[in-house]
Amino acid sequence: MSEESNAVIESITVTYESEDIPSVSTLEASNIGLDEATLNGELTDLGEFDEADTFFRYRETGATEWTETTTQTLTETQAYEETVSGLESETEYEFKAVAEFNGDEETGDTLTFTTLEEPGDAEIVNRTSPLEGSEYQSDVIDHILDVEINEDGDYTVTIEVDGEQRFTDDINGAVAGETYSYNEQIDTGGFGAKTTEIEVKKQSDGS
């Protein structure tokens, strides 16, 4: 008669604790201009480390390569920032905060910002009337607006109502920084919503 052998198997559970590592957050960009912006981030945790190298990566949205800013070595949790310049106007950029430590890195969320539009030679500002698409109970409407000059030159201001020119004014010898105010009463030819187009054109080059 054969003897039956019993095998005893011991189960061992081993738990590996993950290293307590730094973390970083990306904050909204500020001071956004035509060709520059301030990138903001925060080192939110140092974990078991005494310091972390923090910086930003940024690029034009859709580009393949990132540009890195100067590294800031932080020894405590705090917000940090970096101003980047040489950007293209009216362009969307994406960026993220980065923290490096012991050869590894952690990154924050990727956020975006858009640089400002390059101003024209002159622009319409502080326009308070008329409001597009509004119904008016009068056939005479006040057009209240300012024209701000950004570059020296001669300009022509025109107002069209439903495609018909109702007002024109030449500004000759305008100097950058000057502002011309208008409060003109325009006969619209009847009640109802009107499409108003106000244009400032430079006489010398038609821009």
Image: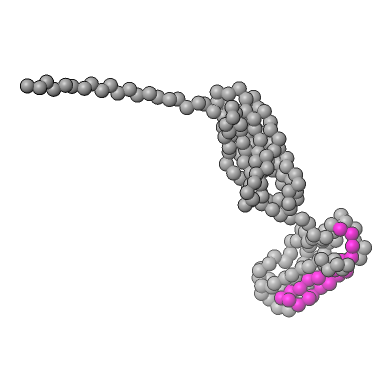
| Residue farthest to the bottom, as pictured | 189
Q: Quadrant of residue 164?
A: bottom right
Can residue 205 be seen from the camera position used here?
A: yes
- Residue visible at 73% across and 48% down in the picture: 87
Image coordinates of residue 157 in percent, x first then y, are 83, 68
Q: Is residue 64 left or right of residue 153?
A: left
Most common SS among magenta residues:
strand
Quadrant location of the N terminus in the rendered image: top left
* Quarter location, residue 148: bottom right
For this orientation, the residue located farthest to the front is 1
Judged from this view, the residue extending furthest toward the right is 173
Is 64 contained in the magenta span? no
Q: Which of the 4 image quarters holds residue 195?
A: bottom right
Viewer-proximal residue, 206 or 197? 206
Which residue shows up at 62% across the image and 25% down it? 51
Compared across the picture, whether 198 is left or right of 43 comes to right
Q: Nearer the viewer, residue 40 or 16?
A: 16
Magenta residues (range): 151-170
Q: Residue at x 54, y 28 (%)?
A: 21
Residue 108 location (% of width, % of height) = 58, 38
Q: In the image shown, does 19 or 8 lie closer to the viewer?
A: 8
Q: Is residue 137 visible?
A: no
What is the x, y in percent for residue 96?
Answer: 62, 41
The residue at 82%/60% (across/down) is 122
What is the total number of numbered labels drawn onto the structure image?
0
Q: Indicate the position of residue 97 as horizontal and vertical percent values.
A: 62, 38
Q: Is residue 198 left or right of residue 153?
A: left
